[in-house]
Amino acid sequence: MMEWMSTIAAISPMRAWGIDVPNYFWFTGSSAAAFIISSFAHVFGFKQFKPIAGFSLLLAFVLLVAAPFNLIDDLKQPGRLVNFFLYGWENFGTSPMKWGVLLLIAYPVLILVEALILYRPYFIKRMEEGRGFSRTFYRWLTLGRASLDAQSLEKDHRLGFTLGAVGIPLALCVHGYTGYILGAVHANTLWHTPLMPVLFLASAMVSGTGLLLVLLPIFQRFFSLSQAIDRSMMATLAKLLAWFIVIDLVVRALWLSFAMPFGMQSRELLYQFFSLHFNMVVYVEYGLCLILPMIVGFSKLRHNLGIVIATGVISAVGVWLFRWNTVIGGQEIPRSMPGFTQYIPEIFGQNSIVSVASNWGIFIALLALVAVIFPWDEEMETHYQGVNNGSK
């Protein structure tokens, strides 16, 4: 009843988006970050990232495949998904959601093709060792190119570089369009800023690196050939995370320093909003989830494996909270009258806590499937041969 009264007082419709949407934004953003970290080696030639480039590329692919399930759940009726493709193209130029339809098709296809090219030599090896269906399956994955001569490998290298170079702006657009969706909404005080796509991209680099800090040691310790964690790589990623946090904090400072002192009618609402969520935003989101991992990344603490993994967890969670506070919090702000609304997600059903947990279950299942099909461990091991990385 109170929510209905607040909604009436604020002359606002019922909340359009629930818990699925911030989760979708988190997945697409983390995918973009994982792809860009992969491109550090494949496009920019940073050799220290070579061992994890293939794994990071596969992680980017899985995250992006799992992400749209949030949107399907949010639609309430999955059949409505067809409408995305059938209607609204006349508004393509001013519809970020239409941009997203094309990006969500093109980007995972590009990642998949790049991964097939990267792992082609390993597919050929498995094809030659396999029998029956296994042999046929890996022959399909080679895309009909079973040669390993120097010319073929050089062609793979050129294709991988080209796809990686094309994929970087595509990855930025995939997550940037989600920021456009919010930033273009004039009626929402918290969302309406041209900085929103940049804000989303900056925080995405934090969540993607944080997720890599969590998953990489798990896969290296329990599923790789050497079963050894690359501690040197973990320290490098922790420092990279710290730099991404610096960029994220600068962009957020620009956003808030413009919106709150210089906003016209909006600044009072923003003051009320941040006063209402002061403890969550300042102490948890900024202090615990951003400042603390940044200190770890710039100090000798980044050589402590346990602390680095913990910073990966809390930085990834912090960005999820930022997505939540932005998407859900933005809808709490009234349009014209006082009275902030309150949203508590359902435990079961669509747009619920269980549906988000199920999406994470899909992500884990897809990641396990991809890890079984793609010989990421063999590819990773080739880059560690003869290298002392402090592994244990």
Image: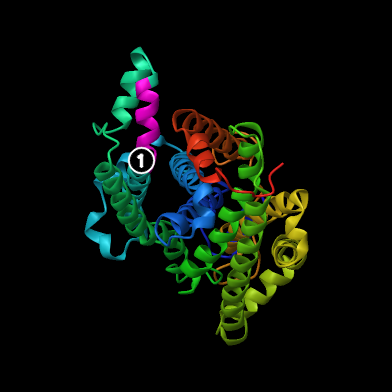
Looking at the rendered structure, the kind of residue marked 1 is Leu
Above/below status of 288 relative to 219: below
Q: Main secondary structure of the magenta part?
A: helix
Question: In the rendered image, which quarter is residue 301 located in?
Answer: bottom right
- Report x, y in % for residue 78: 40, 35
Q: In the image shown, does 209 or 341 lie closer to the viewer?
A: 209
Identify the residue at image location x=44%, y=67%.
185
Residue 16 visible within the image = no
Residue 346 visible within the image = yes
Above/below status of 84 relative to 238: above
Q: Is residue 362 magenta?
A: no
Q: Disc count in the image? A: 1
Q: In the image shown, does 171 or 386 lie closer to the viewer?
A: 386
Using residue 176 as the reference point, say whether residue 298 is left or right of it: right
Using residue 87 as the reference point, say whether residue 311 is left or right of it: right
Q: In the image shown, does 5 or 136 lie closer to the viewer?
A: 136
- Report x, y in % for residue 1: 66, 50
**Magenta stretch in the rendered image:** 115-128
Above/below status of 147 relative to 274: above
Identify the residue at image location x=28%, y=43%.
150
Alpha-carbon neighbours of circle 1 within 10 Å: few (<14), some, or many (≥20)? few
Q: Residue furthest top?
A: 132
Identify residue for label 1.
Answer: 81
Q: Residue furthest front?
A: 386
Using residue 36 as the reference point, say whether residue 277 is left or right of it: right
Identify the residue at image location x=72%, y=55%.
311
- Report x, y in % for residue 372: 49, 28
Q: Secondary structure at mark 1?
A: helix
Task: Tell me the quadrant of the picture where the C terminus can be found.
Answer: top right
Q: In the image shown, does 373 or 310 lie closer to the viewer?
A: 373
- Report x, y in % for residue 239: 65, 63
